[in-house]
């Protein structure tokens, strides 16, 4: 079952269960997907494109969570954490940190990078391999760690 079909099914279930938080998150994700379809030239997104939209939404929710924590708004932090947990159910499976680090090390050796001057070259080579499978910030940290070490 595709992510979009899963969203539609879960939307019905959330409506029946009167789960307002889940319903709001699912509607938000569907809305973002429909906006991306309108912006797209072929009007039908692939699963990879849908996963990209979902990951973008999760990233925005994480940023909101950080801002709420900085503002010391515990009521909003709790609410945002619940929404983030629901949204992450629709994200593609993420690689573990060990798997990400292994791919980064392999890519560095393939590219022949030796210093931070090669950072852009390494990131350009590693990100297509990890697109949708790992957070870019985590990849960034591992690349910096390997090139400095």
Image: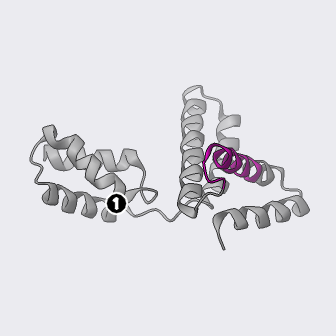
Q: Please report the residue visible at 72 percent of the width from the left and 67 percent of the height from the top.
A: 5
Q: Please report the residue visible at 13 percent of the width from the left and 47 percent of the height from the top.
A: 149
In the displayed orientation, state which residue is furthest to the top: 71
Q: Is residue 24 left or right of residue 42?
A: right
Based on the picture, tell me whether residue 80 belongs to the magenta stretch: no
Q: Is residue 17 left or right of residue 70?
A: right
Q: Main secondary structure of the magenta part?
A: helix
Where residue 17 appears, x then y in whole percent? 88, 62
Q: Is residue 125 left or right of residue 47?
A: left
Q: Please report the residue visible at 53 percent of the width from the left and 63 percent of the height from the top.
A: 92
To which residue does mark 1 refer?
129
Viewer-closest of 134 and 36: 36
Based on the picture, tell me whether residue 35 belongs to the magenta stretch: yes
Query: Which quadrant does the N terminus fall into?
Result: bottom right
> Magenta segment range?
26-43
Where residue 81 appears, x then y in whole percent? 63, 46
């Amino acid at each position: 079952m595709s992510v979009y079909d899963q969203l539609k099914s879960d939307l019905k279930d959330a409506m029946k269960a009167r789960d307002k938080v889940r319903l709001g998150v699912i509607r938000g994700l569907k809305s973002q997907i429909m906006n991306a379809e309108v912006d797209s030239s072929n009007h039908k997104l692939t699963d990879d494109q849908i996963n990209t939209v979902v990951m973008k939404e999760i990233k925005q929710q994480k940023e909101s969570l950080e801002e709420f924590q900085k503002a010391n708004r515990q009521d909003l932090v709790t609410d945002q954490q619940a929404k983030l947990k629901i949204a992450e159910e629709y994200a593609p499976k993420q690689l573990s940190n060990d798997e990400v680090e292994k791919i980064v090390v392999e890519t560095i050796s393939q590219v022949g990078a030796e210093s931070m001057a090669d950072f852009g070259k390494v990131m350009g080579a590693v990100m297509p391999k990890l697109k949708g499978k790992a957070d870019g910030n985590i990849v960034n940290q591992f690349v910096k760690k390997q090139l400095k070490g």
